[in-house]
Image (tube, rainbow, N blue to C red):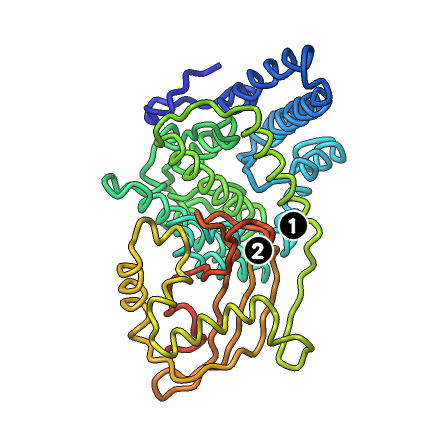
Amino acid sequence: MPTQSPNEPGKLTPYGSAKDLPSYQEMVRLIQGGKLLTLVIARQQREKILEIEREMNRLAKAVDDFYARLGPRNWIFHDRMGVEAVEAMLAETSNAEEAEQRLIRLYQDGETTKRWIMRFMTQDGLRERLNQIERAKEHYDASQFDSCVLHLIAVMDGFVNDFEPTIRKGLASREPNDMTAWDSVVGHHMGLTHAMRTFTKTIKKRVDDEVFEIYRHGIMHGAVVSFDNVIVATKAWNMLFAVADWGIATQKAAEPTTLSPSWNDTWSTLKRRAAYKKYEKEFVPSKVTPSDPGFEEHHVVLRAAEFLDAWLNRRWGLVAAFTPARLLGSKSEGEAARFAKDVFEQYALRSWDIAMVTHDHASAAEVRAVVTVGDKSTEMRFRMALQTANGDIAMPTDDEATWRLAVWAPDTFFTETA
């Protein structure tokens, strides 16, 4: 097992196995304690403990098997991947080439990648780049793979550059081990750090042959001229999701050490994850327009109307209530209102009329409206996300769950310059 120090992220080394992850080791400790406890009391909980143990071992096996098959080809197991999909991919293919093609088809499922992308709404540095990420997806779906790769490389470089403002080093300037992720499956020794060796490889002499890796240096400096294929583009998506996980893991590693969770805390967390997974699986996308029955009472329509009305009437305190929770931080009500005013006052909204709400994700929706800004009529589109009070993606049954703006940038709302 490698030496891991959550308080010294610069000294992290990649994990040899998913079973080396600190969270896995902590769960092993809790489960062993739970087994001993249920020998004496709470025997009805024993099967639940054994079920969790089986699920943990299943996840660890899926991660390690994935890396054994696809790690040498620079594919990374990230948190958005479902264990069931990975298990099926590995079970139904016999070699790395077949598994790679099966994995690419997973990314080509537009609804799957859309759900994955929506999780960027709660992550600083990626939320602000959602427009470019969505353009990359449009290019990917249109088989314009080279332009998709260029967009995603720019997003990854920019996100990592912003991540540590005192350092200001983009992804291309990082050594592979700089991207070791604490307590994350992307921190596997065949994961992100392994793929980084190819990403950062210096290529000065022109390469005319088609390539199937993300040679960032050669691509950006024009030395690699033939990378317009689905494999490179999909690896760029794969790496973006892995870099996002690295960011989350690095932030967690920097947090003050807390007391170990109790069994009740752990069980509650697992139940919450299972409940959201069930909610997401049962969710059915829908669209509503003014001609549909119940349009005016639709929960997203009502919330969007509140936002637009507050903006129209320059009630900045009410507009502030739609700020993404993670942007509010510890701002007072007055500070939040001034923040909203600074962002929205330059766009003089004169009228609005909601034309459609597309509820395309379990916890997100797109609102389309015809608006007048100043003396100009235009279409406006913005996304809303159902969030908890601390900014996590929520379910309707969660306490204090509310619809907020997904992107706090009105200049991105307009299809034409307002």
Q: Position of residue 373 (x, y in %)?
A: 38, 82
- Using the image, determine if residue 319 lies above or below residue 387: below
Residue 414 image offset from top left, x and y in percent: 43, 74
Counting residues from the start of the chain, the first of labels 1 and 2 encountered is: 1
> Neighbour class for label 2 at 10 Å: few (<14), some, many (≥20)?
many
Per the image, label 1 sits on a secondary structure element best described as helix
Please give the label number shown on residue 280.
1
Q: In the image, what residue type sits under mark 2?
A: Ser
Q: Quadrant of the C terminus?
A: bottom left
Q: How many marks?
A: 2
- Res 293 quadrant in image: bottom right
* Left or right: 220, with 82 as reference point: left
Residue 107 position, x and y percent, is 61, 49
- Pick the front one: 109 or 145: 109
Which of the labelled discs sits on residue 363, or is there none? 2
State the image coordinates of residue 355 (x, y, percent, origin top left).
56, 79
Q: Residue furthest front?
A: 41
Looking at the image, which residue is at 65% across and 53% down?
109
Residue under the point 42% across and 54% down: 127
Q: Is residue 297 above or below residue 164?
A: below
Q: Is residue 272 left or right of residue 371?
A: right
116 or 316: nearer the viewer: 316
Question: In the displayed image of the protein, which residue is found farthest to the bottom?
Answer: 375
Q: Residue 88 or 172: which is nearer the viewer?
A: 88
The amino acid type, in three-letter code, at marker 1 is Glu
